[in-house]
Image (cartoon, rainbow, N blue to C red):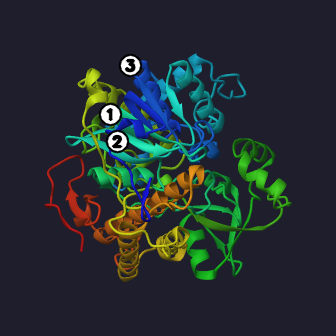
Amino acid sequence: MASGNIINFPDPSGRSVFDVDLVADVLVIGGGPAGAWAGLAAARAGARVVVAEKGYLGTSGAQAAAGTGAYYIKPDDPVHREGMIKARMPIAFGFADESWIEKVYDQSFINQDLMSRWGYAFPKTQDGNKERWGGMRAADAVLFLRKQLEKHGVTILDHSPALELLISDGVVAGATGWNRRNGTRWQVRAGAVVLATGGTAFRSGIAGGNNNTGDGYLLAAEAGAHFSGMEFSGQYGIVPKGSACSKTAVYGSATLRDANGEVVSRGKGTTVAEIQTGHVYCKLDKYDDIGRERIQASQPMTFQYFKRYLPLDPFTEEYEVEHILEGTIRASGGIEVGEGASTSVPGLFAAGDTTSREKLVGANQSGAGPATAWALASGSWAGHSATLFARRYGGNVATRKVRAIGTAGLRPTGQVRADLDVNELIRGVQEETLPVAKFYRREGTVMQASLDRIDGLWRDARESLGGDTRLGGADLARSVVRAREAAALIASARLIFTSALERKESRGLQRRADYPVIDEREFSHVVVSGLDQLQVERKAIGGGEVREQARAAS
């Protein structure tokens, strides 16, 4: 298997080298709600489907740990429809598309209605009616979807991260990966691939986010996909100090104070207070008895922390809070997708947090309800579109000549360096992305220094990062996966800082100290592509003509 210190990955056309070798019409990479719905949509359309999930489909990922609901629009209710569509526009900073919002929320209702028909027990309101909005308990909802996938004959590969895509004549044709529990290698040749790997918070500690290392970004970049809105990534959540569950809704009826005892507002006020004074303190003292009961019922993970690790009464006692990066998991940037969740690469579709959500939430955070609605809708669209695309190949899927395109962390251009530590590479990225004082409010010279450092990490990873071939079995598999995770985190940070340097204004989640106001000359999408050399272009809002030709990032 090894030549020197470099893992020798044979040409995937030699199919006997894989422990698990499958053929599918549609391969879905990622098993959160977006991936589950992509698999369901494809299977219900008659496709042979494989879903490859990095963890265990049903419990893995940020969504399963969050306990969030999904926004939707009630059919035949014009007041509700108007309110849901219009409510987001004032905080979208001009980027959201009303027709897009309507399509997403309509599809979200359809999907939740299907879940109800299939037997999912939505919570009920006091009058006994099923309550979807805010009521889809994410952990058991995704597990419920797993059961539906199994009923529809979908093959699920648990604990099996995809490490590289396969290409056939410029068309994405499958993927290969490892099972990190038993060390087996797998290949799936497919007529089309859906990326649903989620966003990344750079392993900040956000609940359920450890597996979200930007894997889909790296896979997409290697295939030549475009990314939009990656500068809209400075999203932080507020948590009890030392906690992981960032549920902003909890703090809607709280008194928040800085280290000097001054009352501050939730959101920007608390973030600035932490940066300037070092500490923020909270007491949930504005809830009445009914409010206390409801917030504890709707946000159980937050209050579980008080019961187990911080034994106090948060409604009467003050405690310290801090900000934790939620990144692109709760922001709006990602892989650029068009109608049917198609990317700029033939055969490659994308859904959920790994995609740009600018047309849904603009330059602001995607939050909980909109993000989950987008996962349901985009997953369904991606699965259906991938099925239609795959039909053109019929029975030729298994016989197409393919090549694997994995790069950094998988196929280094030189010899693997023993001193190139994966954990050190990840810490290097985190030092530039996690600190609220650096990543929340940005400044050009600081960002350029960060990008320069991260570019250096990328060169090291590109040339000398790979799995440890002294290991075998599952240990080898995990070392290869860790190397690819480090490469993906580095690639994600490069996309973000390149985009943030390009947008010379403050708009939504892009906050620049050196350009502190909105500049209408900057009212366009920042689109980045490339791998070793990133290219930047500007696109008009609403799908108009490209304002500038692609150019190398400076």
Judged by depth in the image, the label closer to the viewer, 1 or 2, is 2
Q: Quadrant of residue 243?
A: bottom right
For badge 3, the amino acid type reads Ala
- In the rendered structure, which amino acid carries the disc numbered 1? Ala
Residue 79 is at least partly visible in this image: no
Whether the residues at callouts 2 and 3 have beta carbons within 8 Å, the answer is no
Q: Are marks 1 and 3 in contact (CB under 8 Å)?
A: no
Vertical order, 241 against 57 (above or below): below
Q: Residues within 10 Å of mark 2 (few under 14, many from 20)?
A: many
Camera-side residue of 525 and 417: 417
Residue at image mark 1: 192
Name the residue beneath numbered marker 3: 45
Q: Nearer the viewer, residue 460 or 342?
A: 460
Q: Which residue is mark 2?
A: 12
Left or right of residue 202: residue 233: left
Q: Residue 105: horizontal and vertical position, in percent?
A: 44, 33
Earlier residue among tags 1 and 2: 2
Return the x and y of residue 247 as percentages of the image width and height: 63, 53
